[in-house]
Image (spheres, rainbow, N blue to C red):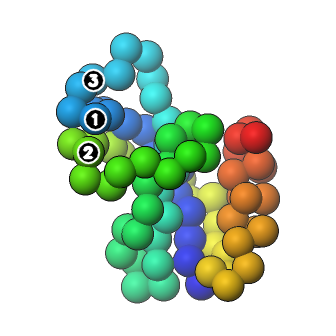
Amino acid sequence: MNSVDKIRFLLLNGESPEATCYGYMELNRDGNMIALYNSCGEEIDMFGGHEFVRIRALGKFDDEDRDNFYSLLESDGVG
């Protein structure tokens, strides 16, 4: 089971965002980050000079069935 956490970016692409900027972090079953997403749910480069803090966990989903992943993002207002 993978999980999704809501995050707040302190740096996005190496620069401070002008306004409060949220995104999402996907973790694998071992708790390692495997993907970052912007506030629209679009995947962004994990190595783009980002700094962030975790806000809260949104939930878990089966990596074989990504429908629940998108449902978690929709429950947070994405889409």
Looking at the image, is mark 3 or mark 2 earlier in the sequence?
3
Residue nearer the viewer, 56 or 48: 48
Identify which residue is drawn at 46% across, 78% down: 28
Nearest to the eye among marks 3 and 2: give it: 2
Q: Is residue 12 left or right of residue 38?
A: left
Quarter where residue 64 is shown: bottom right
Q: Label 1: which residue?
A: 13
**Residue 55 seen anywhere in this rendered image of the structure:** no
Can you say whether 24 is above or below 15 in the image? below
Residue at point 71% right, 41% down?
78
* Amino acid type, label 1: Asn
Task: Measure how far apart labels 1 and 3 are at the Cα level.
Answer: 8 Å
Residue carrying label 3 = 16
- Specify the amino acid type for callout 2: Gly
Residue plotted at (33% across, 55% down): 46
Residue 23 position in % (x across, y down) = 50, 42
Mark 2, Cα crowd under 10 Å, few <14 / some 14-19 / many 20+, is: few
Whether residues under marks 2 and 1 lie with C-beta atoms below 8 angstroms apart, the answer is yes
**SS of the residue under disc 3:** loop
Residue 52, compared with residue 66, is above or below; it is above
The reply to whether residue 64 is in sight is yes
Task: Name above or below for residue 20 compared with residue 58.
Answer: above
Question: Which SS class for mark 1?
Answer: loop
What residue is rendered at 21% in x and 33% in y? 14
Q: Which residue is mark 2?
A: 48
Residue type, label 3: Ser
Question: Where, quadrant-wise, is the N terminus in this rendering?
Answer: bottom right
In which quarter of the view is residue 67 placed?
bottom right
Q: How would you rate the neighbour count of disc 1 (Cα within 10 Å): few for under 14, some for 14-19, many for 20 or more?
A: some
Look at the numbered discs 3 and 2 and tell me whether their residues touch, using CB distance below 8 Å.
no
